[in-house]
Amino acid sequence: MEKYQIAVIGAGAAGLVVAIGASMAGKKVLIIDKGPYGGDCTNFGCIPSKALIASAKAAFFIKTGQEFGLHLNDSTFRSDAALDRVRSLVDEVRSHGDALALEKKGVHTLTGVASFENDHVIKVNVQGQMQSIYSESIVIATGSFPKVPSIAGLDHTPFHTNTSIFDLKTIPKSLAIIGGGPIGCELGQAFQRLGAQVSIIHNKEQLLDKEEAEASHQIAKQFEKEGIKLFLKQNIQRVQYLNNQFIVSLNEHKSLEVEQLLVAVGHQPNLKTLNLDAIGVRYTEDGILVDSHIPRVACGSKDFL
């Protein structure tokens, strides 16, 4: 059994910082991840979304150029290459934190799904083969994955989350987004500016309902000015996929027919495969419960990792 001083489960932003830092301090370190390395931020979050937003901002200035006294002779607008640019930037950033790059930094890597056997032994499923690893200390940095709401018919459709939306080869003619939180709002405005007709469906009275009402009002006002359709206080009754189109049934017998559907209702922690019960770690659907000795975030009346 291979032995390490520190094993890190999860090669996202948190795990990479711990693993590289510990290696630089002279520790024998292993990082375990099912891939792709880089976690949500690199592959499905900050890097691709902000790259798309940058292209969308440029597109917005082109479209509104006349307001600044600018006139373009060519009225053709093509933006599909913006998605190619996103993937190119993700590949570039990922190359600095993939398995090969980490090995060069002195961090051992193992690509597979980890679960605890006891306080110091981790089992790793590597393409169907089980390997056991011993480590003096183990860091859990497994991040989160997109929530999928319980909506009739949704699981029988090829909907997208933030983990797949950037794989689109073309900007869709129409896009419905379930969820008016940060992900839904930023990607909704980006796709609208790049040529899609975007509809945002949210079950609360305002977008970004955790923010101040005035801020939400200003964002909604700007979205409507840019042509985004807002459906607030709406509960989705059913989702169907017929003839390459999504049919989203709303309250009051309303329905939307769109080319693509993005589910953006938040994230939940990646804990299911870890077998935390084997080591007595307390957790809920919101995350791992911690005490005052571990950095944490407030979550209601309790503290979670």
Image: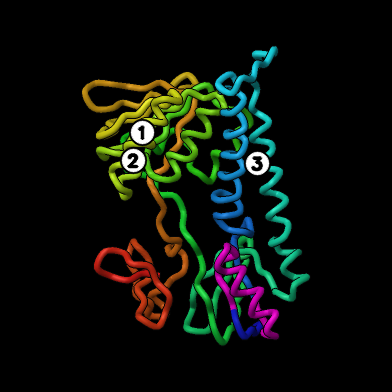
Q: CA distance from mark 3 to mark 2?
A: 28 Å
- Residue at 40% across, 72% down: 296
The three-letter amino acid code for the residue at tag 1 is Ala
- Residue at 31% across, 35% down: 152
Which residue position is annotated with label 2? 216
Residue 13 within the magenta-colored segment of the rendering: yes
Seen in the image, is 72 located left or right of residue 273?
right
Q: State which region is magenta.
A: 7-29
Residue 166, image x, y percentages: 58, 39
The three-letter amino acid code for the residue at tag 2 is Ser
Tell me the element at label 3: helix
Which residue position is annotated with label 3? 86
Which residue position is annotated with label 1? 220
Q: Where the C terminus falls, by quadrant? A: bottom left
Q: Earlier in the sequence, mark 3 or mark 1?
A: 3
- Residue at 45% across, 36% down: 262
Residue 261, image x, y percentages: 45, 32
